[in-house]
Image: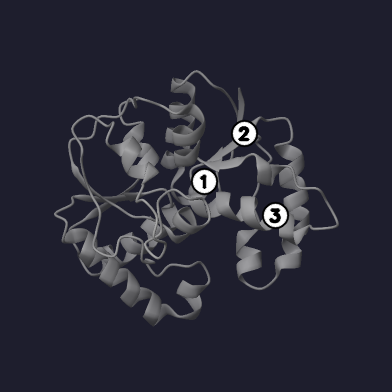
Amino acid sequence: MKVGLFVPCYVDALYPEAGVATYKLLKHYGLDVGYPEKQTCCGQPMANAGFQYKSEKVIETFDELFKDYDYIVAPSASCAAYVKVYYPKILEGKHECISSKKIMDVVEFLHDVLKVDHVPGKFPHVVSVHNSCHGVRELGLSSPSERHIKPFNKIIDLLNMVEGITVHEPERKDECCGFGGMFSIEEPAVSTRMGEDKIKRHMATGAEYVTGPDSSCLMHMAGIAKKEKMPIKFIHVVQILAAGL
């Protein structure tokens, strides 16, 4: 199986450890992992800012770079969801998008494709799981509370394989943290208040760490927690799954 590793621009710039952990974890399972060095942003920031047409060239480039891989795996539910859901819509009638059929968040890939029954991570800490909006409602990483279906959570399924870990979820477990890309810039007061509320609910679980599949959400909450001196830490889920590699 040939896997293309897509490391989103903000992960590359701010949280490269999440990208490295993804690579190590995929190699741990014996996969042929490639990293196209000319990869760029997926185009989501332009679209979120209202300039969707400016991401068209980026999409075509992305498609070309990853065309020879069986799967494209990313440590970002948000960016994976953008490629999967919006690439075909943006280029409808102009370009047949291949990437949207192959892109997966790393949690989704490990759980649904590899169907792993073990992870190498050892993490003797209490964590609270952050279910990001894109992960829940566009990738199906966990069941959305507004739908009356049997509850499931692929993130927790994987975390429960980690040696020494204790896993919790906060009250109102799939409510937005307030980041929302451009929303946090255009509505900073509302965004910050939502983040504060979310952090408090995570802390109420007794967690030492908040973890999830989106560094953007974790970044938003970590910034608020640091500013307000809230005693809780943040870590991408793939870093826990790969801890010790």
* In the depicted structure, whether residue 90 falls above or below residue 124: below
Toward which corner of the image does residue 25 lie, by quadrant?
Answer: top left
Between tags 2 and 1, which lies in front?
A: 2
Residue at 39%, 67% (x, y): give it.
Answer: 176
Q: Earlier in the sequence, mark 3 or mark 1?
A: 1
Q: How is the image coloured?
A: one colour
Q: Which kind of residue does numbered mark 3 sit on?
A: Tyr
- Residue 12: numbered disc: 1
Residue 44 or residue 173, whichever sits in front:
173
**Other-residue count near label 3 (Cα within 10 Å), few / some / many at <14 / 14–19 / ≥20:** many
Residue 15 or residue 200, whichever sits in front:
200
Residue 47 seen in the figure: yes
Q: Earlier in the sequence, mark 2 or mark 1?
A: 1
**Other-residue count near label 1 (Cα within 10 Å), few / some / many at <14 / 14–19 / ≥20:** some
Task: Check disc 3 and report its element: helix, strand or loop.
Answer: helix
Q: Which kind of residue does numbered mark 1 sit on?
A: Asp
Between tags 3 and 1, which lies in front?
A: 3
Mark 2–mark 1 distance (CA, rounded to whole Å) = 20 Å
Task: Check disc 1 and report its element: helix, strand or loop.
Answer: helix
> Is residue 224 shown left or right of residue 148?
left
- Residue 87: numbered disc: 3
Quadrant (top left/top right/bottom left/bottom right) for the N terminus? top right
